[in-house]
Amino acid sequence: MARLAINVDHVATVRQARLAAEPDPVTAAALAELAGAQGIVVHLREDRRHIQDRDVEVLRRTVKTSLNLEMAATAEMIQTALRIKPDMVTLVPEKRQELTTEGGLDVTLHEESLRGVMETFHKGNIAVSLFIDPDPKQIKTAHRLETDYVEIHTGSFAEAKTFQRRQEEYDRVGTAAKLARKLGLGVHAGHGVDYQNIFWLRNISEIEEFSIGHAVIARAVLVGMDRAVREMLALVTG
C-alpha cells in the first residue's frame, strides 16, 4: 500500500503573494500529518519564490513523519540541506523561468557531478531521491549512482490529452517503476497527480509513495486541509 506525502509549497505561494505571515506552510504541514499524511515535501528554490529558509528550519523541528527537501544540486542548497538535515533530499532540475518543475533531472548527462553529491549526502546520513523521467536509461544511471530512491516524473502522464496518449505514458511509468524496483531502488512518483488520475497510478504496485501538492492544496482552499488530505489518502490506499 502506497504512502502519501503532501507538498505544501503552494501554501507558501499564497503567502508570498502578499509577503504576509499567512497562510503558514508549517501549520498546513501539521494539519496534513494530523489528517494521515505520511510525509511532508517542500521545494526550497534558488529564487525563494515560495518556501523560505525559515520554513524548512521550522519544519525540521515540527514534522513528525518524514521531511523531504526538494532542491537543485547547487553548492548553496547542498550546504543548506547538510545544515537542516531533512530525512531525505530529492534532487530536481530547476530553471528560474519555469512555473513549476517541467521534467525530470537528466542524471545520465550529469552522472559524474552527481556522484560526488550523492556521496556527500550519504556521508551526512541523508537519504537521496532522484526526480527523473520514466526512462530506463535514467533508471539504470540512478542505480549506478547508488541513490536510495527514484521519484518518477508523472507530468507527461498527467498532461496527456487523449486516452491513447495517457495509456502510453502510464505504461512508461509502470515499466520504469518495475525496472527501478528490480534494481533494488525505492520508488516514488509525483507531478500532476490529482483526484482523478490517481485511479490509474495507484495500480502500479511498485510505487511506494506519491508526492502530491497542487491538487491537494487547491482542494483544501475549498474544503479545508483535513478533508482534502483524507480524501486523497483514501484514494491512494484504494
Image (spheres, grey):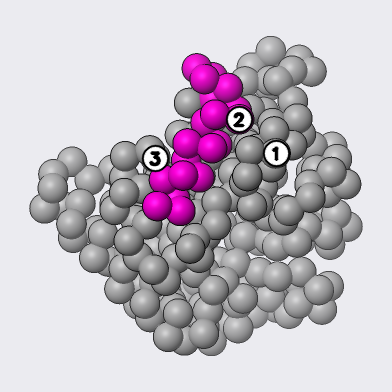
**Looking at the image, which residue is at 42% across and 71% down?**
206
Rendering quarter of residue 42: top right
Q: Residues within 10 Å of mark 2 (few under 14, many from 20)?
A: some
Badge 3 marks a residue whose secondary structure is: loop
The spot of residue 36 in percent (x, y) is 63, 44
Q: Residues within 10 Å of mark 3 (few under 14, many from 20)?
A: some
Q: Is residue 78 visible?
A: yes
* Tag nearer the camera, 3 or 1: 1
Magenta: predominant secondary structure element?
helix
Which residue is identified by label 3?
194
State which tag comes first along the sequence, 3 or 1.
1
Picture layout, residue 47 above or below residue 3:
above
Picture layout, residue 170 above or below residue 199:
below
State which tag comes first along the sequence, 2 or 1.
1
Which residue is identified by label 1?
34
The answer to if 227 sits in the magenta stretch is yes
Which residue is identified by label 2?
226
Q: How far apart are labels 3 and 1 at the CA level? A: 20 Å
State which tag comes first along the sequence, 2 or 3.
3
| Stretch in magenta | 220-238
* Tag nearer the camera, 2 or 3: 2
> Image check: 149 left or right of 192?
right
**Looking at the image, which residue is at 55% across and 36% down?**
229
**Looking at the image, which residue is at 27% across and 66% down?**
172
| Residue type for callout 2 | Asp
User: Quick check: marks 2 and 1 in contact, CB under 8 Å?
Assistant: yes
Q: Nearer the viewer, residue 226 or 178?
A: 226
Badge 1 marks a residue whose secondary structure is: helix
Badge 2 marks a residue whose secondary structure is: helix
| Residue type for callout 1 | Leu
